[in-house]
C-alpha cells in the first residue's frame, strides 16, 4: 500500500510538471491548488505508463503492478522530464523544472522539501530496466519523496 501511495504522490508531481510544460508559464496559486493540479496530471501519466508496460493478462498486471510500480513511476518521471530518457536525474533538470513549473512562492519551499530526495537521485545512479527489472534502485528516492511530500503544504 505504501508503494501505491508513493506512486500516486510522485505521479502527482510529475503530471503537474508535464501539464506545465505543455501550458507554459506558471501562474501564482496556493500550495494545495498546485498539489491538486499535479495530482491530476500524475494520474494521467501513470495511466499512460501502465498501458505502455503491456501486461499479458490481468493476473500478470496485478502481480507486476505491485512489484514494479517503481517502473511505472520511472516511466512517468521520464515523460515529465524530471529524468532523462535513461531514467537518471540531473541537477539541471531539477533546477529547470522547479523554476519553470512551480509558482514563484513555492520554489524555496519545494527546494527545502525535496532537495534531500533529489540528492539521492543525483548521487546514486539508477540502474536501467534491463539491469533492474523491477526498478528497485528507485526505492530510496521514491521513499524520500513520499515522506517529504506529506509535509509540503503543511
Image: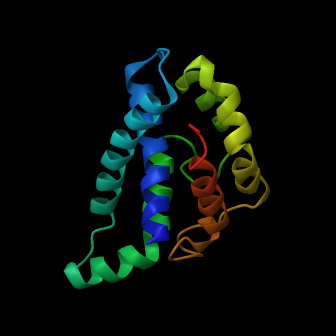
The relative height of residue 77 versus residue 5 in the rendered view (above or below) is: above
Q: Residue 33 at x, y = what percent?
A: 42, 29
Q: Quadrant of residue 24?
A: top left
- The structure residue drawn at horizontal position 45% and vertical position 78%, both measured from the top left corner, is 67
If the image is split into quadrants, where does the C terminus sit? top right
Count of numbered badges drawn on the protein: 0
Locate residue 60 relative to residue 29 in the image: left or right.
Answer: left
Q: Quadrant of residue 72?
A: bottom left
Residue furthest left in the image:
57
Locate residue 17 relative to residue 56 in the image: left or right.
Answer: right
The relative height of residue 63 versus residue 8 in the rendered view (above or below) is: below
If the image is split into quadrants, where does the N terminus sit? bottom left
Q: Quadrant of residue 152?
A: top right
- The structure residue drawn at horizontal position 57% and vertical position 76%, both measured from the top left corner, is 132
Locate residue 82 relative to residue 58 in the image: left or right.
Answer: right
- The structure residue drawn at horizontal position 38% and vertical position 26%, both measured from the top left corner, is 22
Amino acid at each position: 500500500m505504501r508503494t501505491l501511495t508513493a506512486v500516486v504522490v510522485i505521479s502527482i508531481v510529475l503530471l503537474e510538471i508535464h501539464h506545465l510544460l505543455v501550458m507554459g508559464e506558471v501562474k501564482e496559486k496556493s500550495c494545495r491548488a498546485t498539489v491538486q493540479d499535479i495530482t491530476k496530471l500524475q494520474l494521467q501519466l501513470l495511466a499512460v505508463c501502465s498501458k505502455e508496460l503491456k501486461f499479458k493478462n490481468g493476473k500478470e498486471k496485478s502481480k507486476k503492478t505491485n512489484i514494479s510500480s517503481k517502473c511505472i513511476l520511472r516511466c512517468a518521471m521520464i515523460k515529465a522530464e524530471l529524468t532523462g530518457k535513461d531514467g537518471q536525474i540531473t541537477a539541471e533538470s531539477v533546477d529547470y523544472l522547479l523554476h519553470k513549473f512551480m509558482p514563484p512562492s513555492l520554489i524555496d519551499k519545494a527546494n527545502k522539501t525535496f532537495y534531500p530526495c533529489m540528492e539521492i537521485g543525483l548521487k546514486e545512479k539508477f540502474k536501467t530496466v534491463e539491469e533492474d527489472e523491477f526498478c528497485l534502485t528507485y526505492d530510496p528516492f521514491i521513499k524520500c519523496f513520499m515522506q517529504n511530500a506529506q509535509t509540503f503544504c503543511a
